[in-house]
């Protein structure tokens, strides 16, 4: 029958893109909520609220897709990797913030390089992009070694996403 599909399942590639978006927006929501009480300007506080509400809505919608993500095997749905979250310290949060920054920097440099026509500027941006790639690898390696980023275990990766998204959504501001 046209338009009907068997039980919905996300493809692997879209699951990974969903992971990237949820991880990025969860970190952003946490950062906004931590900063909100420090914002003194009334207009800027309203802008923060728009961002907080927008990211909250985005996360709730995206989290609904996790049950139809690909499954490699049935496993414990609770991630057992991010030790810092269990200890109550925020090492994972802070590492995730610079990981997100580094990843965004690499993407921004790549786009800028495709638009650059001045040779010396091209060389400068390329050098800075390589540096951003190295910084990304440095913080990723730190997180991976510490069990904060289970890159080779999709189930733990997605379970960690949900845990961080729920934490971000439940934070007071």
Image (cartoon, rainbow, N blue to C red):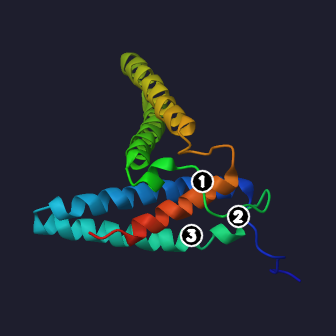
Foreground residue among 123 and 72: 72
Mark whose residue sits in front, 3 or 1:
1
Residue highlighted by disc 3:
63
CB contact under 8 Å: marks 1 and 2: no
Residue highlighted by disc 2:
69
Residue highlighted by disc 1:
80
Quadrant in which residue 152 is drawn:
top right
- SS category of the residue bearing label 2: loop
Reply above or below: 46 against 25.
Answer: below
On screen, residue 58 versus residue 38, left or right, reads: right
Identity of the residue furthest to the bottom in this view: 1
CB contact under 8 Å: marks 3 and 2: no
Which x, y percent locates residue 12?
73, 55
Reply above or below: 3 against 134.
Answer: below
Q: Quadrant of the C terminus?
A: bottom left
Q: Is residue 18 visible?
A: no
Identity of the residue furthest to the right in this view: 1
């Amino acid at each position: 029958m046209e338009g009907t599909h068997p039980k919905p399942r996300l493809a692997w590639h879209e699951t990974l893109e969903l992971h990237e978006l949820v991880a990025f927006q969860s970190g952003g929501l946490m950062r906004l909520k931590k900063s909100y009480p420090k914002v003194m300007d009334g207009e800027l506080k309203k802008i923060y609220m728009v961002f907080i509400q927008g990211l909250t809505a985005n996360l709730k919608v995206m989290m609904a897709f996790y049950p139809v993500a690909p499954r490699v095997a049935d496993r414990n749905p609770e991630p057992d990797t991010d030790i810092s979250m269990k200890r109550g310290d925020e090492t994972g949060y802070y590492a995730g913030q610079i990981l997100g920054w580094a990843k965004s920097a690499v993407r921004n440099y790549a786009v800028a390089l495709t638009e650059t026509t001045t040779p010396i500027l091209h060389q400068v941006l390329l050098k800075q992009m390589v540096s951003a790639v190295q910084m990304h690898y440095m913080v990723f390696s730190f997180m991976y070694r510490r069990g904060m980023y289970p890159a080779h275990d999709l189930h733990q990766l997605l379970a960690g996403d949900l845990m961080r998204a729920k934490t971000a959504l439940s934070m007071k501001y």
